[in-house]
Image: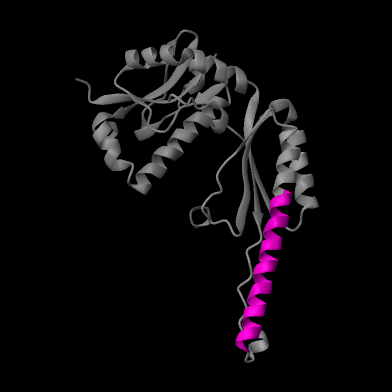
Amino acid sequence: MSDTARYVYAVSRGLEGAVLEGLTGLRGAPVELVSHAGLEAVTSDVPLPEFSEDGLREHLEELPWLEEVARTHDEVVRAVTAHAPTAPMRLATIFHDDEAVRRRVQEWREGLVEVLDRIDGRAEWSVKVLAPPAPAPETTPGGGPTTGTEFLRRRKAQASDRAEQQEAASRVADAVHHELATIAEAARLLPPQDPQLTGHVGQMVLNAAYLVPDTARDLFAERVDALRGRHHDVTLEAGGPWPPYSFAVLEES
């Protein structure tokens, strides 16, 4: 029995093996192709004890391990995406051997072809809109004493100001999303990210992904810049072009 398994990073179409020369994946293993039915699974060997069902159950609780695997997974996907339409697989998609990979590609083939048709010649862009952080509530103006009634009045006014600020930021987010979605071929609204994990300052009122044709790349970037200049009361962050994770990963995978 082999002491390695096959880790599948992505499935591509029309990918030449020569472009993988020198590309390494997890644990420094060379990245290889497993071809089947006109598609190419992008794979590398991984140590079975570490990536077995029990091993994954243990290691997925370890943040440094998870970050390293996710980083390498993304590096391989990005390298391949530069050469062919590519559907990224979910993290830690593991098979015992090449034949098992081929069987699964055959099982998923219809969905994979649909995905690859959808993303061919397109890339993902990320756009986030953040409302400014709420100011710390004041308790005593100028450091002087205050009555209980005045304290409650000011707190109520501050809460009202924060609510209005939040509502205004949400309107901006809706406008930004609507305008960018008219350029993209598809768009997805994603859950706001936890600021403790991302380091973002302020409340995220928009976290969206856009599938943008390569021919509209410059137009999309210019529109983002125009929106940023138009809406100074929020922070607008954009990134891309990236592999189309939000639009390419199969639900079955």
Residue 140 can be seen in this image: no
Residue 56 or 162: which is nearer the viewer?
162
What number of labels is visible? 0
Residue 157 can be seen in this image: yes
| Residue 220 appears left or right of 7 | right
Q: Main secondary structure of the magenta part?
A: helix
Q: Residue furthest top?
A: 37
Q: Position of residue 2 (x, y in %)?
A: 22, 21
Q: Residue at x 71, y 62 (%)?
A: 164
Q: Is residue 87 above or below residue 58?
A: above
Residue 149, magenta (yes or no): yes
Q: Residue at x 57, y 22 (%)?
A: 83
Q: Is residue 30 above or below residue 54?
A: above
- The image quarter containing residue 161 is bottom right
- The image quarter containing residue 220 is top right
Q: Residue furthest bottom?
A: 145
Looking at the figure, which quarter contains the C terminus? Answer: top left
Q: Residue at x 33, y 12 (%)?
A: 99
Residue 229 or 82: which is nearer the viewer?
229
Q: Position of residue 120 (x, y in %)?
A: 62, 20
Looking at the figure, which quarter contains the N terminus? Answer: top left
Name the image colouring: one colour
Q: Position of residue 159 (x, y in %)?
A: 64, 69
Residue 239, magenta (yes or no): no
Q: Residue furthest left?
A: 1
Q: Which residues are magenta?
A: 147-172
| Residue 251 appears left or right of 185 | left
| Residue 105 appears left or right of 247 | left
Q: Position of residue 198 (x, y in %)?
A: 52, 53
Residue 169 or 126: which is nearer the viewer?
169
